[in-house]
Amino acid sequence: MAAGTHLSPQFSVLEGGYSNDSTTSMEDENSETQESLKQMNAAKPPRHLSVMRHCTSSARLSSVAELELDIGNICLTSPPEVKSGFLPVFRSGSCSEIGPKQYMEDEHLCIDNLVEHLGASVDFPSPGAFYGVFDGHGGSDAAAFIRKNILRYIVEDTHFPSSVPKAVRSAFLKADLAFADACSLDSSSGTTALTALMSGRTMLIANVGDCRAVLGKRGRAVELSKDHKPNCTSERLRIEKLGGIVFDGYLNGQLSVARALGDWHMKGPKGSTCPLSAEPELHESLLTEEDEFLIMGCDGLWDVMSSQCAVTITRKELMLHNDPERCSKELVREALKRNTCDNLTVVVVCFSPDPPPKIEIPKTRVRRSISLEGLNFLKGVLDSNE
């Protein structure tokens, strides 16, 4: 029975027609219905199924039909189409703090105009941008080296720019090997790496480790990378298949991430298979007008804040002042307030020169009501609790 449907003794539906019934006929109907329901409960087909009657008023039937039509329109209404001519405008802000740790091991990189940065020597579509967050451990050498060289390895790869995903994957592996050969650096230090390469409307996220990229999509958080923790099922299976173990959440009892660049004291000779991988996971997507901003942060942020919380804070701040740098500082401040135990680095990238629009929830014509039986039931419950 639909909520709000009014039962009236004036009319009864009988095989498609309406007729005036007396109180006696109503009682007969009830007895027949009860008998049919008993048979249904006994797993037998009810007798006289065609003469089971349902009482309602014709006026209420029309209002219920209207209600169902309204609900149907709400469910079937599709969102407005995104304009195919959308072209993002990249602008970014960043914030990095040492937090409660003794040393700062994070690095980051923000290039809003990649075409201008690379110069005329590289053929790359406009607009283009490049961003990176590198969370070092065991010293800052690995993070600093990768920050300085990763873009160069991408651009110089033979697959660039014809196949950017292949170029990025190859660049991560080359950078890892090159760091091992850098004699003046401590090759036992390591780093996670999260990069975002923008080419027109195409965004390619590459991730090694537990930094995270989160897209703000009209107020909704969309995670574009996966945290490579040793306890993650897919990572644990990969580690164990290659002869490693996960002990107390640590790879081989030493490292809290399942993938990293550097850490050559754990990788062994070059070319050998190793549970600690430097291969990035990639995520490629096409930006639309609904995609408002990107948050890139190290685990110092995500250890104390959910992806949705970060998107909500960022969107609120952008609506106030439209400054991505102030947004990144606010996220860092909030993470420190929540007692994060790590260094903090946050990059916020906006895709439009304008602040996010206010989200308006359209009012519906659907009225919610409660039936008389439901109201009486609630009254009974309340009376019994007194």
Image (cartoon, helix red, strand yellow):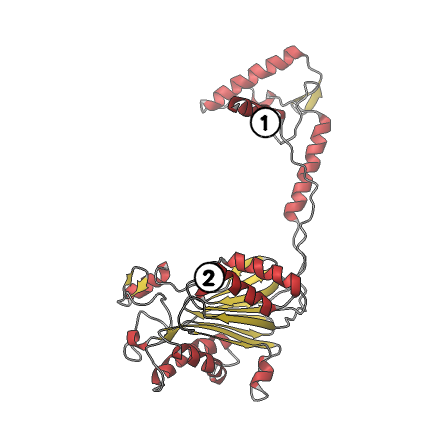
State which quadrant residue 240 falls in. bottom left
Q: Can residue 350 be seen in this view?
A: no
Q: In which quarter of the image is the N terminus?
A: top right
Distance from disc 1 to disc 2, alpha carbons, whole Å, reads: 45 Å
Q: Nearer the viewer, residue 18 or 180?
A: 180
State which quadrant residue 202 falls in. bottom right
View extreme (top): residue: 24
Q: Mark 2 points at which residue?
A: 302
Q: Name the residue under label 1.
A: 374
- The residue lying at 55 percent from left, 67 percent from top is 329
Chain-order first, disc 1 or disc 2:
2
Residue 87: % across, % down: 65, 71
Q: Is residue 383 visible?
A: yes
- Which three-letter amino acid code belongs to the residue tagged 2? Trp
Q: In this view, does 88 lie to the left or right of 332?
A: right
Question: With respect to residue 24, does 348 lie above or below?
Answer: below
- Which three-letter amino acid code belongs to the residue tagged 1? Gly
Number of residue marks: 2
Residue 381: % across, % down: 53, 25
Question: With respect to residue 21, does 7 lie above or below?
Answer: below
